[in-house]
Amino acid sequence: MIIDIHTHCYPDFLAAKAISKIDGTNLKAAYDGTYHGLIQDNKRVGIDKAVVLCIANRPSHQRSVNEFAVLANSNEELIAFGSVHPFSDDYKYYVDFLCDNGIKGMKFQPFYQDFYVNDKQALKVYEYIASKGMVLFFHSGVDLLVKGEYCAPEKIREVIDCLRYPKTVIAHMGCWGYGEKMFELVVGQNVYLDTSFSFRYETKNVRKRFIKSHSADKILFGTDRPWTDAETDIKLIKELGDELSKKILGENAKKLLNL
């Protein structure tokens, strides 16, 4: 089984607008941004399941975003994560709503939600989510469209140290874009790291160092589709050998998600 731990899709009426953000970059969308398009792309490249990461950019978006997550999660090919905004007064309501509807995890994207990942209020929200046994999934490092230090390595490390929660996933190799600091502060910690939109862009030596420096049981295959294709990442991971590639491409995610 191949599981892509890091994908995105949107309601049909928003998909074209979301995909338009690629304009002006050197990226090419892998599909049209809808969940139907994601399912078709899974079949095209041989991916069995994809985790859809939804984001509530504002507290007022929580209801619609999480209702979409529940809808997407009803497809057996997809596993949707929900989203709460850390400055929302009713974040507990939405965490409980998502738990009651079988959602396994929550995604935070501080660049678009406009908060620092180590904010004290945010830490309270993470702790409540962890108390429910859900996966905590964080963007980390740089963002191509927004500038800022929202998810710098020092801030990510503070979250890791404060939570000490084994079901934590840090996207983009743990802080892609920060070079040596990524290795000093995040890689090697007792959290999951995914390969999305980072592994393919590193040199072969950096990829080797990353694989050697982090537990083989804590690396997850992710693409960040539709912002990238999947074939390149799968090829690079399969080059690591059968035993390691099986863990990264699916076995580790199966354990994390209790599939």
Image (cartoon, helix red, strand yellow):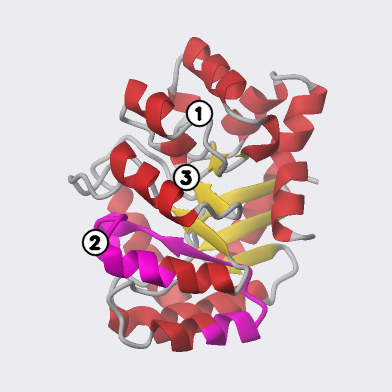
Is residue 38 among what the camera can see?
A: yes
Sequence-earlier tag: 3 or 1: 3
Q: Between residue 23 and residue 171, name the one nearer to us.
A: 171
The residues colored magenta run: 96-125
Q: Which mark is residue 233?
A: none
Q: Which residue was labeled with disc 1?
A: 199
Label 2 crowd bin: few (<14), some (14–19), many (20+), radius 10 Å:
some
Q: Between residue 228 and residue 178, name the one nearer to us.
A: 178
Badges 2 and 3: C-beta atoms under 8 Å apart?
no
Distance from the alpha carbon under mark 2 to that under mark 3: 17 Å
Q: Between residue 72 and residue 241, name the one nearer to us.
A: 241
Distance from the alpha carbon under mark 2 to that under mark 1: 26 Å
Q: Which mark is residue 115?
A: 2
Please tell me in which quadrant of the rendered image residue 218 appears.
Answer: top right
Q: Residue at x 60, y 19 (%)?
A: 212
Is residue 142 among what the camera can see?
A: no
